[in-house]
Amino acid sequence: MELQTLDYKKSPEWDALLKSIRETSEQIKETNLQIMKMREDTDRQIMKMRKEGERKRRKDEKRRLAMDERRKKEEEQRRKEEEQRRKEEEQRRKEEEQRRKEEEQRRKEEEERRRKEEEQRRKEEEQRRKEEEERRKKEEEQRRKEEEQRRKEEEQRKQERDREMAKLKQDLRDLAYRFTSQSGHIIEGLMEPSAMRIFQKAGYDVDRCTKNYKIHIKATGKKAEYDVILLDNTVVIVVEVKINCTKTDVDDFIKHMIPFRELFPEAANKEVLGAMAAINYDRNSDQYAHEQGLFVVRVDNDEIFSLDDSSKDELRKF
């Protein structure tokens, strides 16, 4: 690139450059003057602040000295007052010591007097205790003899009551057995003619009825008794008869039905169902029997026994 040479005597660019340099120089001078002025102002301000700080320091020092002097005076006053209090306290201590000694003397005298009185009371109490102990021993011995006599008499009465109670319990057991046995036979007797009718009415073609079925297999040792068994060519219905049916009776019957097929050969290849028949169902045991998949047979006003309408829902197959 070829450089161009300017004629500084005739070129307007050169004149503009010189003018710009002179203006810049003037601005630098003006800026330096402003800086010097600002520095002088700053120095004066710093000097003023130093003088003000010195005056404040001297004022604070005077105030501190005055406060120290006042504290010294107050401390001296407190020391004198403390000394006075100490002397008064010493005087009170001496007086208190004197009172303590006098009180100690009175206490010893009082303690000695009480000790003698206590010793006298102790001796008298010991004498009374011995007399009372002797009296109690005699009374205790008398009570022991009387208690032993009462115990023997009570033991004799208890033995008599036990014998009477044992006899009464045996009589009640005999009576309950006879009542239960007779009642059970009565209920079974009432159930037998009604059973076939109510289940035929429910849609089962049962044509045979077995009552009080008992079996004992000697080879296995298994034995069982079933109250009423209804059957035809396709179904077997086993009825458990109770006067008062409980939930426990329902559970026992279900357990009792587990070996039925083995104990009753005619049930082979037939549907085996279970039923509870009772005069009274205790604590919703009839609902419980429904839930366990059993028929529920109950006493009805129109017939001796009747089958619940809901008994056919979800029957348990044994």
Image (spheres, rainbow, N blue to C red):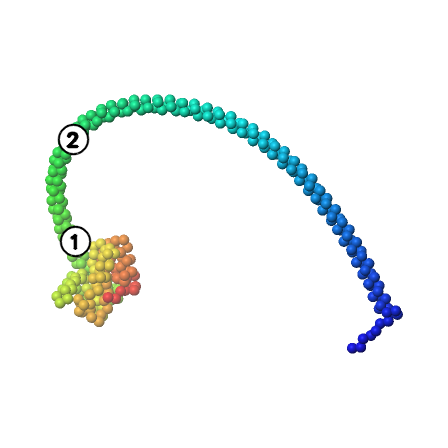
- 110 up-or-down from 62: above or below: above
Residue 239 appears in view: no
Instruction: Choose top left, top right, bottom left or bottom right for residue 292.
Output: bottom left
Residue 234 position (above or below residue 136): below
- Mark 1 Cα within 10 Å, few/some/many (few <14, many 20+)? some
State which quarter of the image contains the C terminus. Answer: bottom left
Q: Secondary structure at mark 1?
A: helix
Q: Position of residue 140 (x, y in %)?
A: 16, 32
Picture coordinates of residue 146, whole percent (x, y): 13, 33
Q: Nearer the viewer, residue 37 or 267?
A: 37
Q: Amino acid at mark 2?
A: Lys
Q: Please give the name of the residue rendered at 27% of the width and 59% of the height, measured from the top-left corner.
A: 289
**In the visual, does 140 lie left or right of 82?**
left
Give the number of marks: 2
Question: Given contact means CB atoms under 8 Å apart, are the residues at marks 1 and 2 in contact?
Answer: no
**Which one is closest to the eye, mark 1 or mark 2?**
2
Residue 70 shown left or right of residue 194 in the figure: right
Q: Is residue 98 above or below residue 243?
A: above
Quadrant assignment, res 225:
bottom left
Q: Which residue is mark 1?
A: 180
Q: Give residue 135's position: percent from left, percent from top.
A: 17, 28
260 with respect to 112 (left or right): left
The residue labelled by disc 2 is 137
Check residue 85 in the rendering and tell me which mark sits there, or answer none: none
Mark 1 → mark 2, Cα distance in angstroms:
60 Å
Q: Nearer the viewer, residue 186 or 225?
A: 225
Q: Earlier in the sequence, mark 1 or mark 2?
A: 2
At 27% across and 23% down in the image, what residue appears?
Answer: 116
Q: Residue at x 19, y 64 (%)?
A: 229
Q: Residue 21 in the image: state x and y as whole percent.
A: 82, 63
- In front: 32, or 278? 32
